[in-house]
Image (cartoon, grey):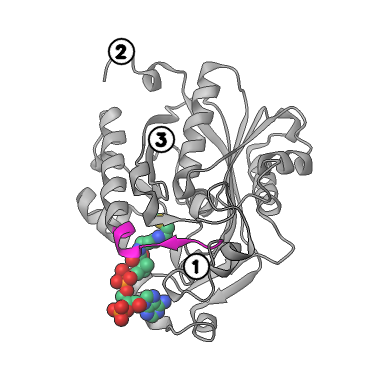
Amino acid sequence: MSASDPVRNARPVTIVGTGSYLPERVLTNHDLEKMVETSDEWIRTRTGISERHIARDDEASSDMATEAARRAMRNAGVTPEEADLIVVATITPDMFFPNTACFVQDRLGARNAYCMDLSAACSGFLYGMDAARALIAEGSVRTALVIGAEKLSCITDWRDRATCVLFGDGAGAVVMRRADAGRGIMASHMGSDGALAELLNLPGGGSRNPASPATLDRRLHYMKMTGNEVFKHAVRYMCDAGQKALQRCGMTIDDVDWVIPHQANMRIISAIASRLGDCMDKFIVNLDRVGNLSAASVPVCLDEAARGGKLKKGDIVLFVAFGGGFTWGATVMEW
Ligand code: ACO
């Protein structure tokens, strides 16, 4: 590691509180059997998912984000007025604009924060943490709220059995500040490859294919995915990012206590564990109960692990994520 490495030279930044929110309604695989031609057995063996939470019609991403943020701030002992920055990572914003973070700010009464959304699909939360870490280390932000929030049910094609069984709704949040003690966030590695955008996207409703009766007819307002291709890239890039982030802080997988991966598919998670070094026992998984939550996936799993007492002070945690774009990232931190 060179002496000029910005991550190592910055004062450590850490997570001081976590929170999450899952909508009340649960959609099981058996419910899905009544909606499309599928089976509980197929979904569980191919994906590892048994059920997922689905937001109410009147519940938007900002509503879930606000509740997750409230819980994270309560956990951190931070008041809304103390937040200088709110980042909401999402591919299901309430609207194109204003950004979802502005709605969250208003609901929280976090009037001193500046607010932005971040669009990097399932990697969005790790990208958001990386940006917040840099701003806190540099000194312009003291307290950041980083939230991953998704209402994927509203961009899911409920007639397409290849995708509708995978996704759920929810939100997770962290409060970030400079660390009083410990090493906090130690290293990250982020990457993207826009050449592979075709494999996973939502083509309609933007400036390329503005909303029209024709785009609605062609169901372009729903996610499109070439699942098996996404699968291969997800394994490759999450392993690679994890290894690079660990290398940056002079660690190997043996130094890691817990891996919190983006929860897309149990077979993707198992493949990463075996490639990183036969370490499935270090992986924290909640996919079976929540499905793929895109940007909310990592923070919801993190909050459950933190509240459940799994993470102990001083534990080394590796986060890895991969999503549409393609985008990917990994972050190593001392809990
Ligand atoms: N129920 C029953 N049969 C199904 C279903 C279903 N829900 N979905 C697809 N099938 C059928 C297909 O039609 C196909 O039938 P055929 O052989 O007669 O053509 C067969 O099952 C196999 O389909 P594949 O797509 O090859 O199945 P695969 O084993 O690749 O699993 C899956 C599909 C689960 C989508 C997998 O590719 C995957 O998880 N990919 C990763 C994608 C992902 O998680 N994306 C989320 C966003 S990106 C991210 O978060 C990383």
**Ligand 1: image quarter:** bottom left
Query: Mark 2 or 1 closer to N-term?
Result: 2
Classify the position of the C terminus by image quarter.
top left
Choose top left, top right, bottom left or bottom right for residue 226.
Answer: bottom left
Query: Mark 3 or 1 closer to N-term?
Result: 1
Which residue lies under the disc numbered 1?
289
Query: What amino acid is labelled 1 in the image?
Result: Arg
Query: Mark 2 or 3 closer to N-term?
Result: 2
Distance between the alpha carbons at the discs numbered 2 and 1: 44 Å
Q: Which contiguous range is marked in magenta?
A: 221-231
Point out residue 30 in the picture as x, y percentages from the top left corner.
50, 83
Describe residue 199's horizontal placement relative to residue 205 as left or right: left
Q: Residue placed at 53% from the left, 67% from the top?
A: 218
Which residue lies under the disc numbered 2?
3
Q: Is residue 147 magenta?
A: no
Distance between the alpha carbons at the discs numbered 2 and 3: 19 Å
- Judge the density around disc 1: few (<14), some (14-19), many (≥20) Cα neighbours within 10 Å: some
Ligand 1 contact, mark 2 (Cβ < 8 Å): no
Disc 3 vs disc 1: which is toward the camera? 1
**Residue placed farthest to the front in the image?**
214
Query: What amino acid is labelled 2 in the image?
Result: Ala
Which residue lies under the disc numbered 3?
333
Look at the numbered disc 1 and give the secondary structure of its residue. Answer: helix
Q: Is residue 227 magenta?
A: yes
